[in-house]
Amino acid sequence: MRYMMTYDLMETARNTNQWLGSTARAMASYPMFSAMPNPALNWMAAWGEVTERSFQRMAVKPDWGIRTFTCEDGKDHLVEIDTVVERPFGDLIHFKVAGREEQPRKVLLIAPMSGHYATLLRSTVKSLIVNCEVYVTDWHNARDIPVSAGKFDVEDYSLYLVDFMREMGPETHVVAVCQPVPLALAATAYLAEQDPKAQPSSLTLIGGPIDPDAAPTEVTDFGRRVTMGQLEETMIQQVGFKYPGVGRMVYPGLLQLTSFISMNGERHSQAFNDQIQRAAKGETSDHDSHNRFYDEYLAVMDMPAEFYLSTVERVFKNRDIARNEFTINGHKVDFGKITDVAVKTVEGANDDISAPGQCIAALDLCTGLDNSRKASHVEPGAGHYGIFAGRSWRNNIRPLVIEFMDANSRKPAPKRKAPRKTKAK
């Protein structure tokens, strides 16, 4: 019961801070105070505005915000988000551009389940929707999943990927980002043995911990330093009475957010101080650079406890993937069985989460794959976020990934047309 009380205490603190911000904003904006010009009142209203929005967004899933797409015909076409496969812990969704011919490339974008929602890949989706049919794994917030739905660990996650790949078919190009990289590789190897005809055409692995020991970072050092007992005792809590998942053991999103912010505490503190100053001067808007970033960054989701703990134990501590000892439902997965899926790894030279060397280890594990079907790329000067959503992705990495897909497609490569300006809105 103490875990449930702790969970509710964190939610109470969030609610209280949101209320304090709202109250400060309302009081400082009271018309009577306009007769007494005082900079402190403007600052109080600005503090309230920033505080209320910051704590409110922590409990809200961001919207994808991809509503229309300008096609080659010069017209804006509606973008519909269709649910292709619906499951308790996550859905397979399709960004369908209404009225547009089906694109030759079918891409499965595997989003991480690591605190943030799949919407973290919004810009990645926008860049791929230009000439691809984009499907995304949309993971659910564990606090909203009833206990009756059962557990969800790394093996269950891998089996979800297997089912999604089967649903999409062998012409699919899989792109895994960050945390799911090792599990995407495991799901592909599982299919290579159990259902070879359902294997995807290509597998692009971006900035993931295939072998965490290949290049130590603060994340891998933490994984080695802490014991599983310590993690279970300090990180795992029980969902409170407010949500449908009451009683489910989770790694709370608010606790994860505390860890995220503490890694760059001074930078975040300065960013919020600057935003308060801008708000006091009337220089802020709903879609300014600060709000665009923090609306996504502060929106966090609870992670199933068994998924978090099994990730730390099996991927980081025991290195089951790196040692080719990973099992799914009692079946030992052999990465050497991957012989018909082209594999490409992408790393950022300045990635401090999955440092260069951790992801490229996947190519050595694929002993049955011909070298001509292996590829790797290290992006100079790119950090973790940049290799899948920043300038490095848009300008350098995305074209290489598209080229890799075309070179390893089970369908004829699409004819190239004269480039025209397209954009997602």
Image (cartoon, rainbow, N blue to C red):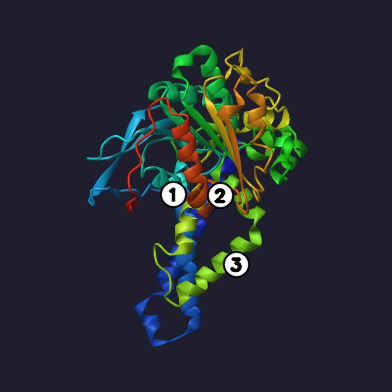
Q: Which mark is residue 123?
A: 1
Q: Is residue 359 above or below residue 165?
A: below
Label 2 crowding class (10 Å Cα cut-off): few <14, some 14-19, many 20+? some
Q: Which residue is mark 2?
A: 385
Q: Look at mark 3 in the image and give the residue it sits on.
A: 270
Tell me how far mark 2 sits from mark 1, CA to CA. 11 Å
Residue at x 53% of width, y 17% of height: 192
Give the percent coordinates (x, y) of residue 201: 46, 26
Image side of residue 359 versus residue 164, left or right: right
Front in this rendered view, residue 40 or 283: 283
Q: Is residue 303 visible?
A: yes
Q: Between marks 1 and 3, how big is the CA–CA gap?
A: 25 Å
Give residue 256's position: percent from left, percent from top: 59, 45
**Amino acid type for the residue under numbered disc 1:** Ser
Point out which mark residue 408 bears. Answer: none
Is the C-beta separation of discs 2 and 1 under 8 Å?
no
Amino acid type, label 2 = Tyr
